[in-house]
Amino acid sequence: VILSPDGAQVVLWLHIVAATVWIGGQITIAALLPLLRGQPELLERGARRFQRIAWIAFGLLVVTGIWNIHNAGITLHEMQADARGRTLVLKLGFVASSGAAAAAHALVVAPRAARTSSGGLRASSATLGSVSLLAAVLAALYGVVIAEQ
Ligand code: HEM
């Protein structure tokens, strides 16, 4: 006999798979950047295709995340009242920062940086991308902390 996954575990599993896409995708794109720099058209097309997958993963993280909160029995009251709830609020701050930095990077700054030779725009674009990745990694860390409680 083996153990089978229950509903809450399937939701948590989907949450983790989506997190690997959001985080791993950003790392992969960053790793390919030096190769694609010389081919701006390919870089732009690749970035646009990656956007679709990345935002689907982010949407899945939000939906399965809300479901996780429900499955873990965390209430709105508990979010301020106990350590697990406050840790969740911190985690959600990282999630919001990751999403906001990624949106500013992908929708506003990176497309402009690709079309100019401005070092400033490229530096802002790289910073926003790094902030998004760092915030996502921290959101994952505090997710593990909550799940282990
Ligand atoms: C950048 C986005 C996110 C990433 C990278 C992320 C990643 C993770 C990871 C790695 C875990 C640990 C799973 C485990 O150890 O079993 C986790 C748990 C959790 N996440 Fe997220 N997550 C994100 C967004 C969200 C959002 C938007 C919510 C809520 C709206 C959320 C709510 C939770 C909860 C409640 C848990 C704990 C589940 C439990 O207690 O079993 N997450 N997350």
Image: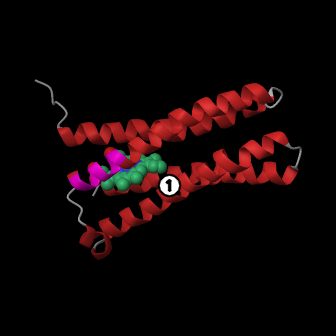
Left or right of 5, for residue 82: right
At 39% from the left and 66% from the top, the residue drawn is 89
Q: Is residue 130 shown above or below 46?
A: below
| Among the 4 quarters of the image, the one containing residue 48 | top right
Vertical order, 65 against 74 (above or below): above
Q: Is residue 149 above or below residue 65?
A: below
Crowding at label 1, few (<14), some or many (≥20) Cα neighbours within 10 Å?
A: some
Identified at 43% across, 60% down, the residue is: 92
Query: Does the magenta-highlighted stretch encompass residue 68?
Result: yes
Residue sitting at the far left: 1
Q: Which residue is farthest right?
A: 117
Secondary element under disc 1, as helix, strand or loop, is: helix
Q: Quick check: 59 left or right of 12?
A: right
Q: Amino acid at mark 1?
A: Leu
In the image, residue 56 sits, relative to residue 41, either above or below, namely: below
The reply to whether residue 144 is in sight is no
The foreground one among 75 and 116 is: 116
Question: Where, by quadrant of the figure, is residue 39 drawn?
Answer: top right
Total marks in image: 1
Camera sees residue 120 = yes
Label 1: which residue?
A: 138
Which residues are the magenta region?
63-70
Residue 15 on image: x %, y % = 36, 42
Residue sitting at x 74%, y 25%: 42
Quarter that holds the C terminus: bottom left
In the rendered image, residue 35, in percent from the top left (x then y), is placed at: 77, 27
Dominant secondary-structure state across the stretch colored magenta: helix
Closest to the observer, 97 or 103: 103
Residue 144 on the magenta span = no
Q: Position of residue 9 (x, y in %)?
A: 24, 40
